[in-house]
Amino acid sequence: MKSRMERHLCTLSINTYLQTNRPYTIPARPAGNFRVFPQLTTDYFVKQGEKSFPAMADNLKSGKNVVETLYILDRIQENKTGDTAKLYPELSRYNKTKNPEIQTFLAGIYRKTQIPDAFGPLVAMLIQNSLNPPKTYFDPNEEIGGAIVSYFK
């Protein structure tokens, strides 16, 4: 029997949660070489761990708040409250993206999970960015290269 919170979490979409619990607005473009995400939202989903995976999967499938979702998944993996490798089918939808923020967070998640199927897409991202360098405020190849190197350890 699921608790009331588990039922609520299963039906709660991250987008709905973000709309109702966002304490402030995130600027569209960061002021420096970093992004800022709402700590309240991140903490909520990180504490839930794998229970939040259905909402994360729905969000990745719909393509809304992808960077923020990847950040939350990265924090979940970092805090060891869930195994984000279980979401590889949803994560792999973004393996061919040209968005440097998505590439960076994917590389970070793949570095921590060491999913064997993710090695090829990481190499493809690195080659793609070498041929057509992204015009961004940071270098995603640093994280991608680090993830590739971690596969050889």
Image: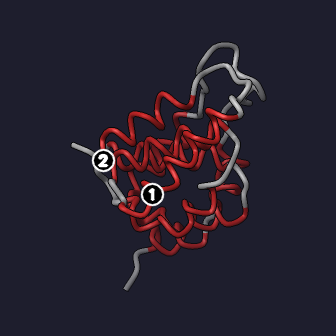
Q: For numbered disc 2, what is the local secondary structure?
A: loop
Q: Is residue 118 above or below residue 104?
A: below
Residue 141: where, in percent of width, then height?
53, 31
Considering every residue shown, the one lying at the far top of the view is 32
The disc labelled 2 sits on which kind of residue? Tyr
Q: Residue at x 41, y 68 (%)?
A: 86
Q: Residue at x 61, y 43 (%)?
A: 102
Q: Is residue 148 above or below residue 96?
A: above
- The residue carrying pointer 2 sits among few (fewer than 14), some (14 to 19) or many (20 or more) residues within 10 Å by Cα, namely some
Left or right, residue 119 beside residue 105: left
Left or right, residue 142 beside residue 27: left
Considering every residue shown, the one lying at the far left of the view is 153
Left or right, residue 152 beside residue 139: left
Q: Nearer the viewer, residue 153 or 58?
A: 153
Considering every residue shown, the one lying at the far bottom of the view is 1
Residue 52: where, in percent of width, then height?
48, 62
Q: Nearer the viewer, residue 137 or 37?
A: 137
- Which part of the image, by quadrant, shows the N terminus? bottom left
- Which part of the image, by quadrant, shows the C terminus? top left
Q: Residue at x 58, y 44 (%)?
A: 125
Residue at image mark 2: 151
Residue 49: where, in percent of width, then height?
38, 57
Left or right, residue 35 beside residue 121: right
Q: Residue at x 76, y 24 (%)?
A: 29
The disc labelled 1 sits on which kind of residue? Ala
- The residue carrying pointer 1 sits among few (fewer than 14), some (14 to 19) or many (20 or more) residues within 10 Å by Cα, namely many
